Image: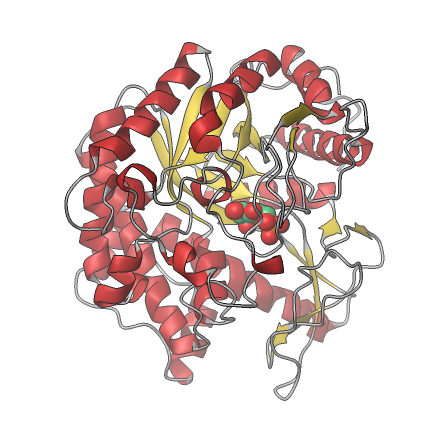
Amino acid sequence: MYHKERDSFPKDFLWGSASAAYQVEGAASEDGKGESVWDRFVQIPGKTFKGTTGEVAVDHYHRYKEDVQLMAEQGLKAYRFSVAWTRIIPDGDGEVNEKGLEFYDNLIDELIEHNIEPVLTLYHWDIPQALQDKYGGWEGRQVIQDFTRYAEILFKRYNGKVKYWVSLNEQNIFITLGYSMAAHPPGVTDTKRMLQANHIASLANAAVIKRFKELDIRGKIGPSFAYGPTYAIDSHPENQMAAQNNEEFNAHYWMDVYVNGRYPTVAWKHYERLGIAPEVEPGDEELLKAGKPDFMGLNYYQTNTVAANPLDGVGFGKMNTSGKKGTSEESGTPGLYKSTQNPYVERTDWDWDIDPTGLRIAMRRINSRYNLPILITENGLGAYDTLEEDGTIHDTYRIDFIKKHIEAIQDAITDGVDVMGYCTWSYTDLLSWLNGYQKRYGFVYVDREELDEKELKRYKKDSYHWYKKVIETNGEEL
Ligand code: BG6
């Protein structure tokens, strides 16, 4: 659908940007912080690009004031960050660490003082290692209580200060990569265990949302879901079916549960026939239904283009984590779908499709199927940047990427989709879980490399100045 003119952005639109604790904070064992599964996992040789760890990351823990100052100068309206569970309860279920809470007290106060709305993510992949050891982390039902207790501490402490809360970040990614592909902790390749851990994570997600409502916390809460709409490679009915499968198994399988408390029929039946469907206990369905989110957090990076994949077809292929274009392998689930190259879009150096229209499609599909407001909690371009001698960074490619995605959001608004805000990924450059530091996303360049921390000095990129104008004009000037 083409519009002659687009509607304006709502007056209170949240122009934001995002990060996650492990990727920015550093100070991995400071002030009583406990060990998380990522602190442990990265010690295994070969798991991350050049063996990078979050030990220092971009030192946000010590430089948060400087980072917030940069946000304030830019006019940022919202900053999404995550709390590290291991700072609050170092072993996951024991004593509360007041020092850990103090860091977030300070960060939140600093943001509010500068009129920046804090958007707090409860969980961005860093479950305490102690709980992993004790009962298998997300595989143990005890995590539902432990996660709720942790969330409740934050709800009560920041009630009235934090108005936007994200429950789980990209459950589909941390569960799939953690339990199917062994690319994230705990490094498992077992679909049955994956589905079981996922079911428990969904229950934990619902439990914290339910608790949020019971406590009457002033604000809104929802999960952030990694959704990239699927296209079929062509109109061949079997390829269309593959696209349908991909939506069902990789999107509805999570979002239907968040919103309606039930698994989609086709995926459920498929897993049942294979004997690997999760065990549902009495009370589970009620809990899932009671945890309905206020909004859908959308992390959008790219679309997926798929084709039919026979029963003896391809399985998981290697991801491109080196930044060498064209090194990602074909990947799929035999009998369901496999990835193919979309001939109509450009790709990044990490082989991610660049597709702004896909964002509009994602928003419209979420709107049609779930009828919830959308908060875009992540969107951005991972690219190589060059720091010039005079301290400038000319990231025109990033400006172009974000501009087109903002236009797509405006199109979706004009279509009638209810959008609360837009957080780019990421604010400063940060540690990419599997891709090191060379894959940069920020408005603010951080001078460090994988094996050389340098001085971690911050520099404003061209995109920083450009986004400042976008915010100032409420999206009128792109
Ligand atoms: C999302 C995550 O999956 O994508 C972020 O929520 C992550 O934590 C981002 O960094 C970009 O992915 P990557 O692999 O390029 O770092």
Q: Outermost residue, left direction?
A: 95
The C terminus sits in image quarter: top right
Q: Residue at x 43, y 18 (%)?
A: 111
Q: Residue at x 71, y 54 (%)?
A: 352
The N terminus sits in image quarter: top right
Direction from residue 219 to residue 89 in the image, left or right: left
Direction from residue 380 to residue 291 in the image, left or right: left
Q: Outermost residue, bottom direction?
A: 312
Q: Residue at x 41, y 84 (%)?
A: 273
What colour scheme does the image use? Answer: secondary structure
Q: Residue at x 59, y 30 (%)?
A: 416
Rendering coords of residue 466 (x, y %): 73, 20
Rendering coords of residue 26 (x, y %): 45, 40
Direction from residue 444 to residue 261 in the image, left or right: left
Up-down relation of residue 226 to residue 312 (above or below):
above
Up-down relation of residue 313 to residue 336 (above or below):
below
Along the line of sight, which residue is nearer the eye, 56 or 378?
A: 56
Up-down relation of residue 141 to residue 89 (above or below):
below
Rendering coords of residue 116 (x, y %): 47, 17
Q: Outermost residue, right direction?
A: 343
Along the line of sight, which residue is nearer the eye, 26 or 151?
A: 26
Direction from residue 153 to residue 384 in the image, left or right: right
Q: Indicate the quadrant where residue 468 lies.
A: top right
In this rendering, does residue 383 appear at all?
Answer: yes
Image label count: 0
Rendering coords of residue 185 (x, y %): 43, 63
In this rendering, does residue 219 appear at all?
Answer: no
Along the line of sight, which residue is nearer the eye, 73 or 102?
A: 102
